[in-house]
Image: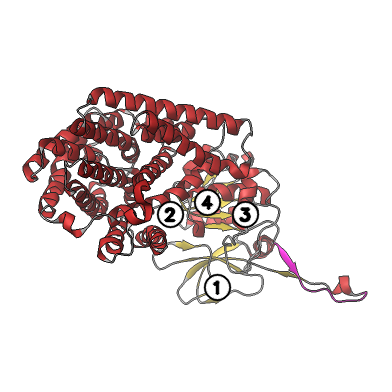
Amino acid sequence: MVGLGAIVVLGVGMQWLARRLRVPAILLLIASGLAAGPWLGIIDPDAIFGDSLFTLVSMAVSLLLFEGGLGLDLTELRERGPRPVVQLVTLGVVVTWLAITAVAMLLFDLPTDLCFLLGGLLVVSGPTVVGPLLQIVRPREPTVTILRWEGIVIDPIGATLALVVLKVVTAGSSPITELVLTTLVGCGVGLVAAGLLVLALRTFSVPDDLEAAVTFMTVIAAYTVGERIFEEGGLFAATVLGVALANQGWVSVRRIVAFGHDVSVLVLGGLFVVLAARVTPADFQGIVGSSLALVVVMVLVIRPVVGWLCTTRAALSWRDRAFIGALAPRGIVAAATSALFALRLTNAGVEDGRIDAIVFTVIVGTCLVYGLGCAPLARALEITEPEPRGVLLVGDQPWLLGLADLLSEADEEVTVLATAQHHLAREPHPWRLLTVTAVDRAVSAALADVRTAVIASDSDEHNALVLTRCLERLPRHEVLLLPAEARRRRTPEPAGDQAVADREDVFDPMAPVDGLDEVGEIVADAKATSDGWQRRPFAPGTTQQAVTAAFATGGIRVVTGPVDAADGEILLGVWRADGSLDLAPRSSRLGPDQVGVVAGGAPPDR
């Protein structure tokens, strides 16, 4: 019981801590697994899971690959150019495998066939490490697309390559035939599973509340079928199932994507903690120095050569090519397959556990190097995208358009989403205008440059739709919702004939928003979100009615503190010391030398 509890707490808690520290989560997960496993004895995976451990590990990896596949857009790949990705997962895999094998022969006292196996295990990178690093570094296109696709597609290829080598080592089977058949069968199973799931969702055979659960069932079923036909075929099946779902146009996969992300957080954390807990200090004796030397060669020689070779004919600058050659951390698939294969080799009397320890050392080493060095390198190469600083204002009321004008004059990047208000496009504005619906691709593209969204149209149904879309792309604390109709709570009614006359409606600024469950599935989800106390913009207690009244009497202006908002005057935002704009100030007062935006309090300028 304590071991299982520790796996969950450490698995999620270390990822939470890593987000706060902005470091690769894998480092904290492995460190906590080592500490809780062989060092403190809190977690003993073999005692907890028994013989089913590696079956569960392999299934969990399939879920991670499925979730990664859901994030792969074929349209995006075609636009950015598929050639570098194809070369990285074919030619790049072969070159990396042979190069690591050659270096391993020089550094380790291992048989030649085990060096080939080690090389196969270490060709993979993985979305669980590459993805978070890309979020931190923010490289420009098409580099980010190439690296994200490589990290996901290479995992089942690398795992299958390592399995082929293992079978050659232990049974002498044909590697080429094994690799081709595993790939074809796994992809076929994944496509069939995707087709069946889409058909079930398209014909409304699956209840809405079971959509995520049925998807989970389908992934496990596809993995199991693929694995039973050809070992490691299940990983191909899970990956192809995710890619197929992400790129079909018959059903929405919004809920599935959200479910996949939540599952991946739980699975990823648990996997790393469990696998790290199985590695004992004795396994590292005599191999740490050689393993670190292998890391140096992989980082400084092998990956740069592979990255440059595989992007030779791509339309990429030398800066992008250099960065692609500087990012290839090893992740969960390398850890899982090495642990599984080490057990099989030990049972066969071929190996004594060093393979597993070498792989874990390489994982930690590459994650440290890339985790600490990628961001400075990207800045030095000048390929990073700037942090989003734009403001999205949703609505078309006069006060909101006036706020957009003022913020634009103050050098803020403002986008106004005024659905179907095409007449606004006839007039020149200093801000970007979108007249499309919230589900249009243009809105998704615009959100890439947005830091804060203020949702304040005069329709709660429209607000609900935009709220859902914004929460898919922006942090929750940066999505501010000002409902059209404020929820009110009633005080107890007095008895007698004066009950109605004396009744008072008291505004509750933290009450949930009404009227968000009337426009279908998306709005229903948004209602559930807003019921979770979505943040409000502007000074505490502000309503749309109050802002409209203040704007009518005094317009919107920039003021410098100290200012204590008087009657009819509303503080809308404050510029922080670092130059960023806070559109949800905690007080209606403006401190000394603070600069803010106020509605009302003075005659309008126009």
- Which segment is the magenta one? 487-497
Q: In the rendered view of the protein, which quadrant contains the C terminus?
A: bottom right
Is residue 512 positioned above or below 256 on the image?
Answer: below
Q: Are marks 4 and 1 in contact (CB under 8 Å)?
A: no
Foreground mark, 3 or 1, reads 3
* 3D distance between C-alphas at marks 4 and 1: 25 Å
Does label 3 or label 1 sit earlier along the sequence?
Answer: 3
Tell me whether circle 2 and circle 4 mark residues in contact (CB < 8 Å).
Answer: no
* Residue 583 versus residue 338 in the image, above or below: below
The first of marks 2 and 3 along the sequence is 2
Q: Secondary structure beneath disc 2?
A: loop
Pointer 3 residue: 528
| Foreground: disc 3 or disc 4 | 3
488 in magenta: yes
| Residue that protrudes farthest toward the left in the picture | 106
Q: Distance between the Cα atoms at labels 2 and 4?
A: 16 Å
Mark 2 lies on residue: 389
Disc 2 residue type (three-letter): Arg
